[in-house]
Image: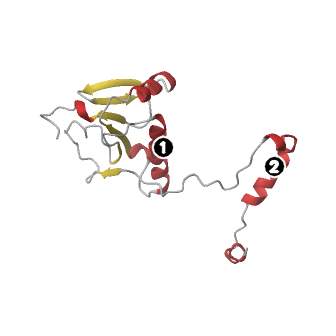
């Protein structure tokens, strides 16, 4: 309370919680309220962030053609797989990154997901639930169409040996 008074700011969240509970009084026995719920126990980390300098650089390499100025990459090791929850988490990271990074707009960001095998469940989710279109632009590189962000999924074992390590 001391910091609130000295800074001139009031902590409105406790009052807001009380107001919501009052508004939903008839349902209190059927609802659970988690006040200032902590989402993660670990720090939020992006596997790899690739920033283009200069921002207007055109990348001809197959895995980087989709890149804008800020590129978030999620990598799954050969013994792991890319799940729907992984997709949702990294998509949330893109939103958070745009929200907290000065001079970065959401339109500056791309998402790349890399794994060694074909992400069947994720692609089914993206096409059937999200209604996205999937296009295999070259061997092992799939562009996801239908979202505001450019998204690609790379099946690393299918990449061209001639073009990729």
Q: Residue furthest front?
A: 79
Is residue 59 left or right of 110 when viewed as pictured?
left
Is residue 128 left or right of 34 when viewed as pictured?
left
* Foreground residue among 93 and 110: 93
Q: Position of residue 163 (x, y in %)?
A: 15, 36
Q: Residue furthest top?
A: 128
Q: Which residue is drawn at the image coordinates 84% and 45% (left, top)?
A: 23
Q: Which residue is drawn at the image coordinates 49% and 44% (left, top)?
A: 92
115 versus 108 height, above or below: above
Distance between the Cα atoms at labels 2 and 1?
30 Å
Would you call the spot at circle 2 few (<14 residues within 10 Å), some (14-19), or many (20 or more)? some
Q: How is the image coloured?
A: secondary structure
User: In the rendered view of the protein, which quadrant contains the C terminus?
Assistant: top left
Is residue 115 left or right of 10 when viewed as pictured?
left
> In which quarter of the view is residue 109 placed?
top left
Do callouts 2 and 1 mark residues in contact (Cβ within 8 Å)? no
SS for callout 2: helix
SS for callout 1: helix
The residue that mark 2 highlights is 21
> In which quarter of the view is residue 14 placed?
bottom right
> What's the mark number on residue 89?
1
Is residue 2 left or right of 97 when viewed as pictured?
right
Which comes before the other along the chain, label 2 or label 1? 2
User: In the rendered view of the protein, which quadrant contains the N terminus?
Assistant: bottom right
25 versus 121 height, above or below: below
Q: Looking at the image, how many numbered discs can be counted on the residues?
A: 2
Q: Residue furthest left?
A: 162
Q: Position of residue 164 (x, y in %)?
A: 17, 38
Would you call the spot at circle 1 few (<14 residues within 10 Å), some (14-19), or many (20 or more)? few
> In which quarter of the view is residue 153 placed?
top left
């Amino acid at each position: 309370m001391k910091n609130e008074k000295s800074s001139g700011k009031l902590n409105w969240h406790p009052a807001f919680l009380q107001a919501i509970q009052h508004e939903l009084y008839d349902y209190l026995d059927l609802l659970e309220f988690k006040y200032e719920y902590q989402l993660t126990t670990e720090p939020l980390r992006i596997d790899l962030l690739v920033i283009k300098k200069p921002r207007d650089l055109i990348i001809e390499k197959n895995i980087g053609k989709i890149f804008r100025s800020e590129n978030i990459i999620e990598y799954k090791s050969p013994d792991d797989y890319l799940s729907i929850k992984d997709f949702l988490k990294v998509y949330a990271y893109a939103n958070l990154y745009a929200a907290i990074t000065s001079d970065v707009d959401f339109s500056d960001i791309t998402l790349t997901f890399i794994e060694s095998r074909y992400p069947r469940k994720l692609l089914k989710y993206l096409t059937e639930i999200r209604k996205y279109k999937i296009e295999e632009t070259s061997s092992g590189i799939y562009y996801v169409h239908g979202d505001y962000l450019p998204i690609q999924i790379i099946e690393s074992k299918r990449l061209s040996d001639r073009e990729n390590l």
